[in-house]
Image (spheres, grey):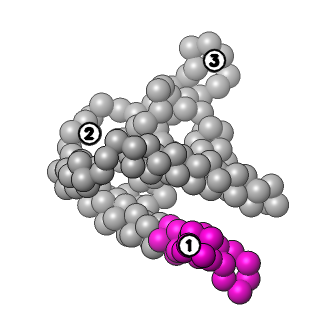
Amino acid sequence: MSSDSATTTDGRSEAAVTLAELGREMSSVTIAFHAAAAERMGLSGTDHKCLDLALHSPGPLTAGRIAELSGLSTGAVTGVIDRLERAGFVRRVRDPHDRRKVLVEVTKCNEGRYDHIFRGLVDGVAEMVSRYRPEEIDVITRYTRDSIEMMRAQIARLNETR
């Protein structure tokens, strides 16, 4: 029997157990990295991750969309936006298509100011990826996308019980 098909006493494959353990450890070190980065930016970890969502959005977001993407309540997101706005990272603007809506837009005032915090991470990922063959990158990419979607489904499931 290969290690891929070996099972544990609770019926899970050893591969699933190993990947779950590595995923938990990856989550922990990712949170620790972003907490350290957030601290150097004068933000909480939650505020930093919500800013990250806004930075990587193709355009301004509503507070409701930030709540949906982050898994936070809309009330919690209002506090996050208030803090990010006071710190100069975002601003609230009226939706040009529906004046009743307010959008959260990233400001340009901090552009490039914090690049030094993330440079080592960006360079480290590039170096790490260079060690894999293209077909391995394809598998890693698929696994990572599947993991993200599975986690989003779990967030939605947990949020349904609020």
The image position of residue 135, as x and y in percent, is 40, 43
Q: Which residue is at a point 79% across and 60% down the rendered structure image?
A: 162
Amino acid type, callout 3: Arg
> What's the mark number on residue 99?
3
Between 132 and 116, the residue placed more toward the observer is 132
The image position of residue 43, as x and y in percent, is 37, 58
Between 149 and 141, the residue placed more toward the observer is 141
Numbered disc in front, either 2 or 3: 2
Quadrant including the N terminus:
bottom right
Query: In the structure shown, which secondary structural element does the residue marked by tag 3 occupy?
Result: strand
Which residue in the structure is indicated by mark 1? 2
> Could you tell me how far apart the alpha carbons at marks 3 and 1 are, in whole angstroms?
61 Å
Q: Which residue is at a point 47% across and 33% down the rendered structure image?
A: 57
Along the polypeptide, which appears first: circle 3 or circle 1? 1
Amino acid type, callout 1: Ser
Q: Are marks 1 and 2 in contact (CB under 8 Å)?
A: no
For residue 69, above or below residue 34: above
Query: In the structure shown, which secondary structural element does the residue marked by tag 1 occupy?
Result: loop
Which residue in the structure is indicated by mark 2? 110
> Could you tell me how far apart the alpha carbons at marks 2 and 3 are, in whole angstroms?
27 Å
Q: Which residue is at a point 23% across and 48% down the rendered structure image?
A: 130
Binning the other alpha carbons within 10 Å of mark 2 as few (below 14), some (14 to 19) or many (20 upward) gives few
Query: In the structure shown, which secondary structural element does the residue marked by tag 2 occupy?
Result: loop
For residue 136, above or below residue 8: above
> Can you name the residue that lies furthest to the right here?
161
Binning the other alpha carbons within 10 Å of mark 3 as few (below 14), some (14 to 19) or many (20 upward) gives few
Between 142 and 60, the residue placed more toward the observer is 142
Amino acid type, callout 2: Asn
Residue 3 is covered by the magenta coloring: yes
The mark total stands at 3
> Could you tell me how far apart the alpha carbons at marks 1 and 2 are, in whole angstroms?
52 Å
Q: Quadrant of residue 134?
A: top left
